[in-house]
Amino acid sequence: MKIKQDQQGEIVVLKVSGKIMGGPDHDKFQGEIKELIANGHVDVLLNMSKVSWVNSTGLGILVSAFHTLSKNGGCLKICEVNDRIDNILNVAQLKLVFETFEHCDEALASFGQE
């Protein structure tokens, strides 16, 4: 898993690529989230257009990040998931937890509407 940060005003876009699995991915992702919070960034958009696979542990990583940001007054939203990942989110009923968007522009605009 690789993560690139992109600042869009008050929102940080995390562009994730590869597979989100567990083990070292958990520490890497949680470290990234904790660093963002420490720097005052609590609204995060996760661009998953380059994510090829997420397993159950990877889903746990996303849920954990969601709760960490929520506890700090922020929000985690997801955009540009492929059909395979979208299906996984549906089956796991995580689309009830995460706001997901087809395009990053529409996801970024949604942050101002809360």
Image (spheres, rainbow, N blue to C red):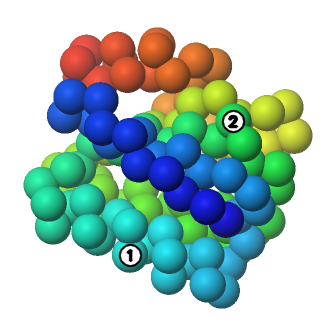
Please, what secondary structure does the residue beneath circle 2 have?
Answer: strand
Residue kind at label 1, given as amino acid type? Gly
For the N terminus, the image quarter is bottom right
* Count of number-bearing discs: 2
Distance from disc 2 to disc 1, alpha carbons, whole Å, reads 21 Å
Say if 38 sits above or below 48 in the image.
below
Amino acid, disc 2: Ser
Residue at image mark 1:
31
Residue under the point 23% across and 18% down: 112
Q: Residues within 10 Å of mark 1 (few under 14, many from 20)?
A: few
**Can you say whether 80 is above or below 38 in the image?**
above
Q: Nearer the viewer, residue 1 or 68?
A: 1
Per the image, label 1 sits on a secondary structure element best described as helix
**Residue 37 located left or right of residue 108:** left
Q: Is residue 55 left or right of residue 48?
A: right
Displayed quadrant of residue 13? top left
- Image point (54%, 45%), residue name: 15
Residue 8 appearing in the image = yes
The label shown at residue 49 is 2
